[in-house]
Image (cartoon, helix red, strand yellow):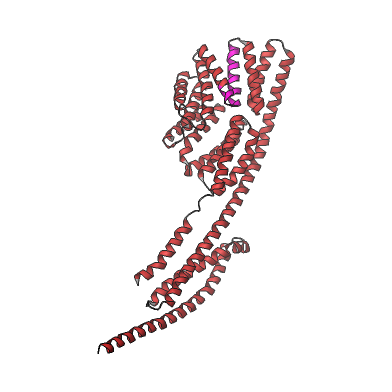
Amino acid sequence: MKQLILIPCVLFISVAVVFSQPGPPKRHEQKLFDSLFTLSRKYFEQGKLDSIPRLNQQMMPLAQKTNADSDFFMVDGSIAEYFYAKSDYSQTFEYVFKALEVGQRGYRQRLPLLYSNIGLTYIELDNYPSALYYLHKGQQYLPLDNWGDAKIGIATNLAYVYQKMAKPDSALKYIQLAYQFNLTKTPDQALNQAEIYRNFALVYEQLNEPALVDYYYKKSIRYSDSVKIPSIVASASKYYSEYLVKQKKYTDAKHYALLSFNAAKKMGFKKGVIGASDLLYILNDQHGRNDSAYYYLKIKNLYQDSVITEQKTNQMQAALVNQQIKEDEQNAKAALDAEQRAHNEEYAAIAFGLILLIIIFLLLSRSIIVNTRVIEIIGVIGLLIVFEFINLVLHPYLSALTNDSPLLMLLILVLIAAVIVPVHHQLEQWIKHKLVEKNKAIRLAAAKRTIEQLEGNT
């Protein structure tokens, strides 16, 4: 008898556990997200920045469907990197801190790389104390990192900030550490190596090692060009040109300034174009090439105006992107809710079907005597499942009808319960009556068999 009582309870608990488990992410959606993210990273390295926002807009709804913290983290980080490349640091911070919120919530193993990127952004704003704060904070999370890029990024950025602060000894220590870390293969090994070569040159420039400066600048430029990373070609060529100007090697300085100008212009890196065109203006002006000097001055002013205009446009686009992302999130959430509700309805129907089968089995069984208490327990569980099933089916309609008013929804559900409970009571009484009759028949048949056996023995 105890086993019969436990059967419906176990079924009910199992169904409740199933309801509480989120469904597994769809594999094709996860694969599509990973492919889009990989393509976004490739575009970023190659300087195809204008193609990245479209990919980000496609990734966000997929992240909503997979509902994985890692996907939310990556798409917010990708948007932040895009705005960083566009020198729009206010928008960079908006998305990088959104990614930070996701990382602190459930994707902590990528926090070191994120703190490294925050530190790098502060370096570009010449806010070195804040840069050091976030870079050292990233170091605290390094044991959680499984990729290795974070260790390299933090070490490289620490070298960069110390170089900016004119502390070449500290900078050299960290850039050597980054070089050692990058000997192990990582997803961004090529980009990291190009930055490391460039930063070696910057550090040796402050340490007054001309031979090493020439070696590492040229190596950074050649390597970046070979692996198709124009952003490092542009920045390394600009820094090298400025160094050559100090050395009064104007012909070579002009060559590398043009290399920086062309690389930055090709990838749409406006900040790089402004820096390179300013160098070319100075070099041509010093040598009396007035037409060329005027041309590069005009380019510089045009790009400066364009950056100001673009920042305003970016703010408007960011507002539109944010709105689009919110709408995509709401649509994806609604779709997920509808899908989960459909699954819950199916599970509730299955559970109710199992309860019904147990009752029918007990009613039709010709050998099991059932206590009415068992039927009461099973009946209560069945009533709860039926009520929950009705609630799942009617909830979207009630929500629209009552405009999500809790009071009205409660009243309607109470009215539904007021109809279901009497029906359940009548059904329970009928089942009990049938079971009593069946129990009497079983006992009567057993008594007859006993009498017949006794008479036969006599």
Give the extent of the magenta segment: 223-246
Find residue 223 and report its image quarter.
Answer: top right
- Picture coordinates of residue 415, whole percent (x, y): 55, 71
Horizontal relation, residue 24 to residue 335: left or right: left
In this view of the protein, which residue sits in the foreground, 430 or 245? 430
- Where is the C terminus found, in terms of image quarters? bottom left
**Does the magenta portion include 7?**
no
Residue at the extreme right of the image, as rendered: 291
In this view of the protein, which residue sits in the foreground, 392 or 371? 371
What secondary structure characterizes most of the magenta part? helix
Residue 403's place in the image compared with 33, above or below, is: below
In this view of the protein, which residue sits in the foreground, 222 or 309? 222
Residue 358's place in the image compared with 36, above or below, is: below
- Picture coordinates of residue 337, whole percent (x, y): 56, 56
- Where is the N terminus found, in terms of image quarters? bottom left
In this view of the protein, which residue sits in the foreground, 442 or 97? 442
- Picture coordinates of residue 148, whole percent (x, y): 46, 32
Find residue 50 and report its image quarter.
Answer: top right
